[in-house]
């Protein structure tokens, strides 16, 4: 078994696709419109769906706002260099909501950014992704 995808509902499909592809450097894997249901699904990720978990963006055409609730936490993405990733995100117009640095009561280096709909994304220094 493995996790196939994680779904979030978004209000502006093209804006969200731009954020995840241009700022977080994901690839748009596929996008499908469902006119009878009045929704679009877009799948993004860092690799092929057969190999990695994807992010599913669900755009309900007639919904302009969502209550994010208080149960959702965040998505986590491993990066080689949290400090550089945040600089790149800021330069691309992204919003860093927690500057890079060690976590409280620990040594893990992390930061938080926010997508256009307010979803939190944690960037974690991932020693396994380093390309030394």
Image (cartoon, rainbow, N blue to C red):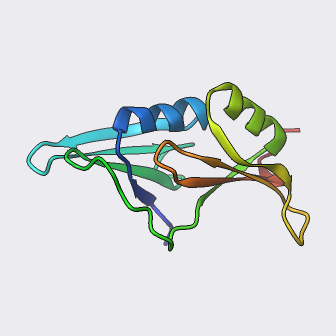
**Total number of numbered labels?**
0
Q: Specify whether 40 is left or right of 71.
A: left
Is residue 28 in view from this perspective?
Answer: yes
Residue 116 image offset from top left, x and y in percent = 49, 42
Report whether 21 appears left or right of 111. left
Measured as percent of width and height from the top left, residue 73 is found at: 57, 67
- Place of residue 86 in the rendered image (x, y in percent of width and height, measured from the top left): 75, 38
Q: Along the line of sight, which residue is nearer the eye, 123 or 120? A: 120
Name the residue rendered at 60%, 33% in the picture. 23
Residue 50 or residue 81, whichever sits in front = 81
Q: Position of residue 19 (x, y in %)?
A: 52, 35
Q: Residue at x 19, y 47 (%)?
A: 62
Residue 31 figure quarter: top left
Residue 81 visible at all? no
Which quadrant: the C terminus?
A: top right
Q: Is residue 92 left or right of residue 63?
A: right
Q: In this picture, is 126 found above or below 15?
A: below
Query: Measuring 49% from the left and 66% from the top, which residue is drawn there?
Result: 3
Q: Residue furthest top?
A: 91
Position of residue 48 relative to residue 102, above or below, is above
């Amino acid at each position: 078994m493995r996790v196939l995808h994680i779904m979030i509902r978004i209000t502006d499909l093209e804006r969200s696709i731009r954020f995840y592809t241009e700022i977080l450097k994901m690839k748009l894997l596929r996008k499908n419109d469902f006119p009878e249901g009045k929704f679009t699904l877009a799948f993004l990720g860092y690799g092929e769906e057969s190999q990695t978990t994807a992010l599913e963006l669900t755009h309900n055409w007639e919904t302009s706002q969502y209550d994010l609730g208080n149960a959702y936490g965040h998505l986590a993405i491993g990066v080689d260099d949290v400090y550089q990733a945040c600089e790149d995100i800021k330069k691309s117009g992204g919003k860093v909501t927690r500057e890079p640095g060690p976590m409280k009561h620990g040594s893990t280096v992390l930061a938080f950014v926010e997508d256009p709909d307010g979803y939190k994304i944690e960037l974690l220094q991932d020693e396994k992704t380093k390309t030394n």
